[in-house]
Amino acid sequence: MNAVLKDTDRDMKLPAPTRDVEQGKRDMDEYGLCVHEAFVSGDQLKALKDRLIEQAELECEQGVALLSGQSRGGKTWYGRPDADVLPGWQGIAALYNKGRVFIDYLQHPLFKAYNAHVFRGASAHLSAMTGLVVRRGAEPMVVHVDQQFMPYTEVPTYLNCMLCLSDFEEVMGATRVVPRSHRGPYPPQAFSTERGAYNPEPIATVAVEAPAGSVIFFESRTWHQSGVSISDKTRYSLTTLWQQHWVKPMDNIVENLHDSVYASLREDELQLLGFKAEPSGRVEARSPSSRQNTNRKTPYVPELRRGSDVRAVALEGMGDRKGADDEAKAMGLNTKR
């Protein structure tokens, strides 16, 4: 692996924004990121922003907001902000539970195109879906990569897709990156009780500015951080983090998904959220009406003992769905039982 990059060795040039997915893929390969303009526009962009703002405001009013002066990587707390001083950062977690408009956004066809390219055809599903509100006073986050907790991998494990619901300007704390840093290694970090995680030496980064409706794609080996906001304008964004299917997700979506939302979703939507065994992610029924993998249905089997009235419940359609073996073979998996 290469030695730690020095600032003098870095070319801080960013790729030009594009509306061409093929150019975006080339930029991902070269820079570890791309800016895809006009990814969302018009009524959909407005609906996403309005729903996010409404949710964020109500979470504050009801004392359940996730707040920080920096980000989820800094000191965070749940509660109600002071009436006269809003924290610099607010996170709105698990957006898949907080409005149909967010589920619809997951259907964007270019997610599939970028995922297939970055993950080299490996199956992928959602790992987390979070809204961010950044205000004046937000502090910078430590320079990091999204797979900092695992060894460097030849293929990235996550793809971060940050939708700009408002314009991203450097003075608003726009996301900052180190272009071409995805080629390894990871940025040096240290930790102290007083400071938390920090970079022992300064690392030069560049702000990614983009108009509302753009998505900033960056893969999980790319060095990045949040910036400092010195603007009176509020920055709104919506992040979908996608992952290869074998990785433990950032959000345990199979557990997190509210029952009412689960019951409302189609099979293809459930697959986007990780309800598919391939071969990781197997779900075993925890009640006769339990959640199931879309391609593998299990019976309800509790502890069974002689003389007990407790019984297993066989369910219609138990076993692998027809066609699941063909899908597994296409991925090169062993389907013998």
Image: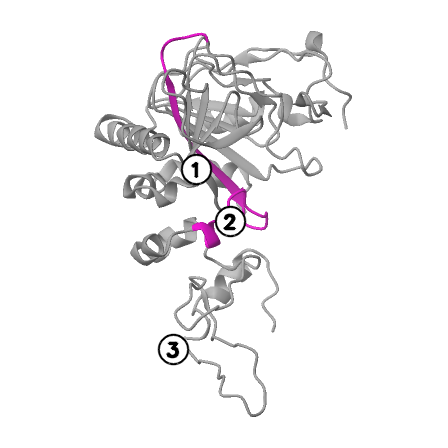
Mark pair 2, 3: CA separation: 27 Å
Report the number of numbered marks: 3
Is residue 334 rendered magenta in the image?
A: no
The tag earlier along the polypeptide, 3 or 1, is 1
Q: Compared with residue 185, is residue 207 higher up or lower down, i.e. above or below? A: above
User: Which is closer to the viewer, label 3 or label 1?
Assistant: 1
Q: Which residue is mark 2?
A: 252
Q: Which amino acid, by three-letter code, is at mark 1?
A: Ala
Assign a secondary structure to mark 3.
loop
Q: Which residue is mark 1?
A: 93
The tag earlier along the polypeptide, 2 or 3, is 2
Q: Quadrant of residue 195?
A: top right
Decide if residue 175 is in sight here. Answer: yes
Q: Compared with residue 307, is residue 337 higher up or lower down, i.e. above or below? A: above
Q: Which amino acid, by three-letter code, is at mark 3?
A: Glu
Q: Residues within 10 Å of mark 1 (few under 14, many from 20)?
A: some
In which quadrant will I find the N terminus?
top right
Assign a secondary structure to mark 2.
loop
Q: Which residue is mark 3?
A: 316
Mark pair 3, 1: CA separation: 35 Å
Question: Residue at point 27% right, 26% down?
Answer: 41
Q: Is residue 120 left or right of residue 100?
A: right
Image location of residue 114, percent across then percent down: 46, 35
Q: Residues within 10 Å of mark 2 (few under 14, many from 20)?
A: some
Q: Which amino acid, by three-letter code, is at mark 2?
A: Asn
Q: Which residues are magenta?
A: 230-256
Q: Is residue 62 left or right of residue 224?
A: left
The type of colouring in the image is: one colour
Assign a secondary structure to mark 1.
loop
In which quadrant will I find the C terminus?
bottom right
The tag earlier along the polypeptide, 2 or 1, is 1
Q: Compared with residue 331, is residue 38 higher up or lower down, i.e. above or below? A: above
